[in-house]
Image (cartoon, rainbow, N blue to C red):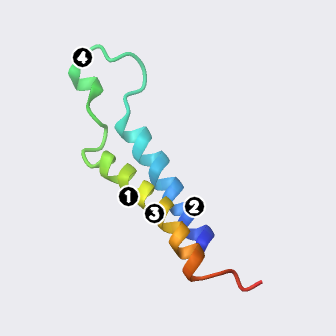
Amino acid sequence: MFWLTLMIGLALTVVGFLLAAPIGPTISPVISEPKLPFAPTLFLLGIMLLFGSAVVYELFPDKS
């Protein structure tokens, strides 16, 4: 369960960052806008899941 929350959080963080951050030179304000309007929200949700995975790690220890 811990690894699942960690990987989902990491994936959301990377996807949110790549969709929110402009790649290449920002010639005009149109290019500097996020490709997806709620991409920064995806990034923040990913960060929250990454930190939340520590809570999952403590509450649901590995049974092996």
Local packing at callout 3 (Cα closer than 10 Å; few below 14, some 14-19, many 20+) is many
Q: Are marks 2 and 1 in contact (CB under 8 Å)?
A: no
Q: Residue at x 72, y 86 (%)?
A: 63
| Callout 2 amino acid | Met
> For the residues marked 2 and 1, what is the alpha-carbon distance in whole angstroms?
13 Å
Residue corresponding to mark 3: 49
Q: Are marks 2 and 3 in contact (CB under 8 Å)?
A: no
Q: Residue at x 44, y 54 (%)?
A: 47
> For the residues marked 4 and 2, what is the alpha-carbon distance in whole angstroms?
35 Å
Q: Is residue 56 above or below residue 19?
A: below
| Callout 3 amino acid | Leu
Q: Are marks 1 and 3 in contact (CB under 8 Å)?
A: yes
In front of the other: label 4 or label 2?
2
Is 7 on the left or on the right of 45, as rendered? right
Secondary structure category for the residue under label 2: helix
N-terminal of the two: label 2 or label 1?
2
Query: Residue 14, position in %: x, y?
Result: 49, 46
Query: Residue 61, position in %: x, y?
Result: 65, 81
Is 41 on the left or on the right of 23, as rendered? left
Residue corresponding to mark 2: 7
Q: Residue furthest left?
A: 29
Q: Is residue 14 above or below residue 33?
A: below
Q: Are marks 4 and 1 in contact (CB under 8 Å)?
A: no
Residue corresponding to mark 1: 45
**Picture disc at residue 28:** 4
In front of the other: label 3 or label 4?
3
Secondary structure category for the residue under label 3: helix
> For the residues marked 3 and 4, what is the alpha-carbon distance in whole angstroms?
33 Å
Secondary structure category for the residue under label 1: helix
Q: Is residue 41 above or below residue 25?
A: below
